[in-house]
Image (spheres, rainbow, N blue to C red):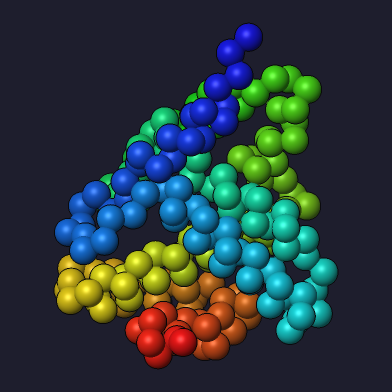
């Protein structure tokens, strides 16, 4: 029996992001997934502590760990291409579904069911998935900030666009994160210390 699931996941570090952009700092989906997991966990904690919700922050972080895992098979499709039109979006969704099936098939059957909800949204986790999507956008915004700080103007339009998208999500957790925690990403190490 070939249980290659974890070995495939280890290849996340080989998939580069932002292929159509000139990058000062390269980023792979392994690094990105860790950042999205940290931010998703933070959003769930904010939701619980500040908004009186009772979300499972650890489950939210676990979902975020795997949110881009299918890109091991599909590669990182640049956003302008992925969302160019409905036909491409539909085709890409089918490719992602096939990649999900392939990855899950690499697990023994007795534990496969534990991973399926990390790849395929369940109704009871719908809000957690919204937070993962928001954290994904926040991670992209942080990348734009880092690139701008490094003197790379390539990401300026993306930064404005992503900021607008985040404000339109109408998620109070995101607003709190952006207002209270995002400004620190503008600081140097000395300023943070």
Q: In the figure, is residue 84 to the left or right of 91?
A: left
Q: Is residue 20 visible?
A: yes
Number of numbered callouts drawn? 0
- Counting from the top left corner in percent of width and height, residue 128 is at 68, 59
Image quarter of residue 27: bottom left
Q: Is residue 105 visible?
A: no
Image quarter of residue 156: bottom left
Image quarter of residue 47: bottom right
Q: In the figure, is residue 125 to the left or right of 2?
A: right
Whether 29 is drawn above or below 185: the answer is above
Whether 145 is drawn above or below 10: the answer is below
Residue at 45 percent across and 86 percent down: it is 192
Q: In the figure, is residue 80 to the left or right of 89?
A: left
- Identify the image quadrant of the N terminus: top right
Q: In the figure, is residue 53 to the left or right of 71?
A: right
Whether 126 is drawn above or below 76: the answer is below
- Counting from the top left corner in percent of width and height, residue 49 is at 76, 80
Residue at 58 percent across and 58 percent down: it is 37
Residue at 75 percent across and 35 percent down: it is 114
- Counting from the top left corner in percent of width and height, residue 157 is at 24, 73
Looking at the image, which is closer to me, 184 or 117? 184
- Counting from the top left corner in percent of width and height, residue 163 is at 40, 76
């Amino acid at each position: 029996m070939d249980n290659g699931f974890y070995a495939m996941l280890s290849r996340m570090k080989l998939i580069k992001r932002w292929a159509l952009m000139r990058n000062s700092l390269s980023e792979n989906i392994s690094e990105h997934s860790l950042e999205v997991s940290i931010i998703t966990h933070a959003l769930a904690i904010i939701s619980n502590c500040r908004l009186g919700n009772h979300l499972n922050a650890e489950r939210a972080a676990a979902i975020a760990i795997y949110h881009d895992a299918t890109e091991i098979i599909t590669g990182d499709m640049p956003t302008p291409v992925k969302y160019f039109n409905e036909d491409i979006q539909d085709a890409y969704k089918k490719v992602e579904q096939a990649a999900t099936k392939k990855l899950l098939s690499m697990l023994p059957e007795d534990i496969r069911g534990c991973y399926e909800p990390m790849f395929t949204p369940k109704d009871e986790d719908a809000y957690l998935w919204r937070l993962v999507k928001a954290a994904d956008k926040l991670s992209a915004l942080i990348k734009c900030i880092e690139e701008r700080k490094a003197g790379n103007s390539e990401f300026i339009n993306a930064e404005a666009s992503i900021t607008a998208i985040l404000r339109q999500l109408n998620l109070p957790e995101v607003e709190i994160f952006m207002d209270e925690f995002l400004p620190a990403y503008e600081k140097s190490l000395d300023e943070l210390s």
